[in-house]
């Protein structure tokens, strides 16, 4: 009879431990999902902020989306790679100084990890007149972002021209 009571106590203890660990795992899973959603929201807010800064020619906001480490790769059609935030900002300052252009953007896809994320976007760049006629350039621009101290920053911008007006 004493052995039977011991087995019952052991079985009851195992049941309690089992249910407790299920609850802990469930809470961990919920925390992971909340953390994942928060991470995706932070990523999305930075890429949208960056695209808006380009569209509005907002140099200061654009710089705030850049890596504080200074690392950056800017890859443009027909150009050498620019390897720094300073070079990226110089390119954009010169571009922002060009008058009368507009750009419309949309996010086509994202792949967001814990430390690195990628956003593929479409840019429709227009000038009312270039060489006496309207000009457009449809580009696919892929951004790589890195999470540093729980904030996302742009570390790579790779543009490919898909369709454009012939000069």
Image (tube, grey):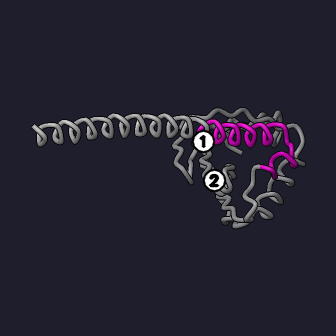
Secondary structure beneath dot 2 equals strand
The picture quadrant where one finds residue 4 is: top left
Secondary structure beneath dot 1 equals helix
Check disc 1 and report the residue beneath it.
39
Tell me which residue sits at (78%, 42%) in the image.
54
Q: Quadrant of the C terminus?
A: top right
Residue 34 in the image: above or below residue 80: above
Badges 1 and 2: C-beta atoms under 8 Å apart? yes
Tell me which residue sits at (65%, 53%) in the image.
157
Left or right: where does residue 73 sit relative to residue 68? left
- Who is closer to the viewer here, 48 or 78? 48
The picture quadrant where one finds residue 166 is: top right
Q: Position of residue 81 (x, y in %)?
A: 66, 65
- Who is closer to the viewer here, 52 or 145? 145
Check disc 2 and report the residue beneath it.
147
Q: Is residue 2 magenta?
A: no
- Residue extent of the magenta highlight: 39-64
In the drawing, what numbered circle is on residue 70? none
Q: CA distance from mark 1 to mark 2?
A: 9 Å
Q: Is residue 43 magenta?
A: yes
Tell me which residue sits at (68%, 58%) in the image.
74
Q: Position of residue 141 (x, y in %)?
A: 62, 45
Tell me which residue sits at (86%, 48%) in the image.
59
Residue 145 in the image: above or below residue 166: below
Q: Quadrant of the N terminus?
A: top left
Q: Residue furthest left?
A: 1
Precedes in sequence: disc 1 or disc 2: 1
Q: Position of residue 70 (x, y in %)?
A: 74, 65
């Amino acid at each position: 009879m004493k052995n039977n009571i011991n087995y019952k106590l052991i079985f009851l203890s195992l049941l309690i431990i089992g249910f407790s660990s299920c609850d802990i795992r469930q809470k961990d899973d919920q925390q992971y999902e909340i953390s994942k959603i928060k991470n995706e929201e932070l990523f999305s807010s930075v890429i949208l902020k960056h695209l808006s800064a380009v569209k509005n020619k907002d140099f200061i906001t654009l710089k705030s989306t850049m890596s504080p480490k200074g690392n950056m790769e800017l890859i443009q059609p027909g150009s050498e790679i620019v390897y720094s935030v300073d070079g990226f900002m110089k390119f954009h300052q010169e571009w922002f100084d060009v008058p009368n252009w507009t750009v419309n953007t949309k996010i086509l896809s994202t792949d967001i990890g814990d430390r690195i994320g990628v956003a593929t976007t479409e840019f429709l760049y227009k000038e009312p007149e270039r060489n006496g006629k309207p000009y457009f350039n449809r580009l696919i621009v892929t951004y790589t972002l890195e999470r540093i101290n729980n904030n996302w920053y742009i570390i790579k911008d790779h543009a490919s021209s898909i369709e454009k007006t012939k000069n």
